[in-house]
Amino acid sequence: MNPKIISIELTPLHVPFKEPVRRVLGETEGGLGMAIPAEEPWLGGDFVICKLIADDGNVGIGESFVWLPESGVLPDQIISVIKHDLYRYVLGESPFNVEKIRYKMNINVALNEVAKGLLDMACYDLMGKITGRPVYDLIGGKTVDEIPLAALIPLADLMLMRGIAKSYYKRGFRTFRLKLGNSIQEDIEICEKIRQALGSEVNLRVDYNQAYTNPHEAIRAIKAIEPFGIDFAEQPVRNNDYIGLAYVQKRVDTPLMSHEDFFTLRDFITLVEMGAVGVLGLNSTRPGGVTNALRALNYAEQRGLGAVIHDQPLGIASAMHIHIATARYHSFSYAAELFGTEMMEDDLITKPLNYEGGTAKVPYGPGWGIELDERALEKYAVATPITLK
């Protein structure tokens, strides 16, 4: 028996940030907690939840998270391209034929990796539901029972940043991602104080959010904090400045990671071949779904690059990342960033994932090993679900 997909259900959502998160962001310049040059208010997360229903009654779920200043697409646009074209390469198909589905989508619809990845993600969950196996069994097997996590420290008053970092340290976190970019001198002060507060054994990484538009200034900024032991630096220059990013990477010792430049697998390959990055940052929408994530990991590993999970999704995509992390644990060089549970007021799953002690425990059960909270889905939906048959 080989069940076929007979229906697609798409629901756009907005999930607000938790009140403490809104309060902290309200105390930061621009209300974003980072140096990204955006005026778009950031009050919560915009998502699309996808259900793929098979003719045997099983349902696979996927999730996409978008924010206009970075991803450049809205939930409505994701739903539109699926409704008007991508659906035809999924309906009537077996979810196990992910390579065929991806090929058909790619040759018929350019780009739109967020929408393609959403469908791809749901296919893997549906495969697990049909077989009664966790997704990690389908992509390499479980190598560990938990994965280490990194804590996100927003760009704010130095004392507030230090206090947040110390609170996460007490909870068991040993890796910290610091938002920087107001000025080189402030960057130095932040790294120095956090390193002093947490000690020499913790791992620090930094995220500039495109703060230094001049590559020469980006080089000075990174070199200024290298004495504090920085694992990698994210997006120091403006997005789409591949040449500038490559110029910086070749002149600093710290590996760079691209986020706002990286949407497709081809983007990442181009950045690597230009010598512009030293770390692959994976999330559920970049380069889109499980199939492309595994391809990107394989490429990064062959090229000798580090890799990190880098996302702040709801429970569905968080579970997806954890499955990839345990199946490909030795391909990742750094603690994972899965910060949605810290930021969003609801994760849309009936039983929360276990994040005790600064780690994420691998969920058990078929597919992603989680269950969608239908009442939460209805609560946070911003439009009536669309069903395609």
Image (spheres, rainbow, N blue to C red):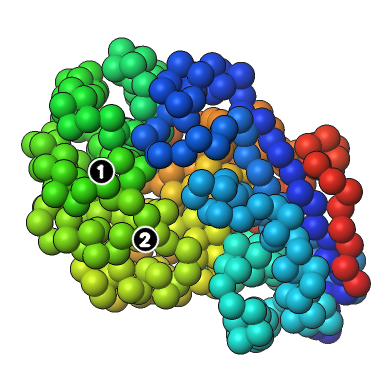
Residue positioned 31% across, 54% down in the render: 257
Count residues near mark 2 (Cα–Cα under 10 Å), then give few for <14, some for 14-19, many for 20+: few
Residue 353 coordinates in the image, percent (x, y): 61, 40
Residue 87 visible in the snapshot:
yes
1 or 2: tag closer to the N-terminus? 1
Q: Is residue 88 above or below residue 41?
A: below
Total tally of numbered discs in the picture: 2
Residue 118 coordinates in the image, percent (x, y): 66, 62
Instruction: Give the camera-side residue of 203 and 253.
Output: 253
Instruction: Give the camera-side residue of 325 and 339.
Output: 339
Residue positioned 43% across, 43% down in the render: 337
In-image side of 167 versus 316 (left or right): left
Determine whether the residue tagged by mark 1 lies in a helix, strand or loop: loop
Residue 359 coordinates in the image, percent (x, y): 45, 38
Tell me the quadrant of the picture where the N terminus can be found.
Answer: bottom right
Count residues near mark 1 (Cα–Cα under 10 Å), then give few for <14, some for 14-19, many for 20+: many
In-image side of 52 versus 171 (left or right): right
Instruction: Name which quarter of the figure residue 77 lies in.
Output: bottom right
- Separation of residues labelled 1 and 2 (CA atoms): 13 Å
Determine whether the residue tagged by mark 2 lies in a helix, strand or loop: loop
Tell me the quadrant of the picture where the C terminus can be found.
Answer: bottom right
Residue, disc 1: 212
Residue, disc 2: 240
Residue 46 coordinates in the image, percent (x, y): 66, 44
Instruction: Give the camera-side residue of 199 and 147.
Output: 199
Instruction: Name which quarter of the figure residue 109 lies in.
Output: bottom right
Residue flagged by tag 1: what amino acid is it?
Tyr
Residue positioned 82% across, 78% down in the render: 91
Residue positioned 16% across, 26% down in the render: 185
Q: Is residue 199 above or below residue 105?
A: above
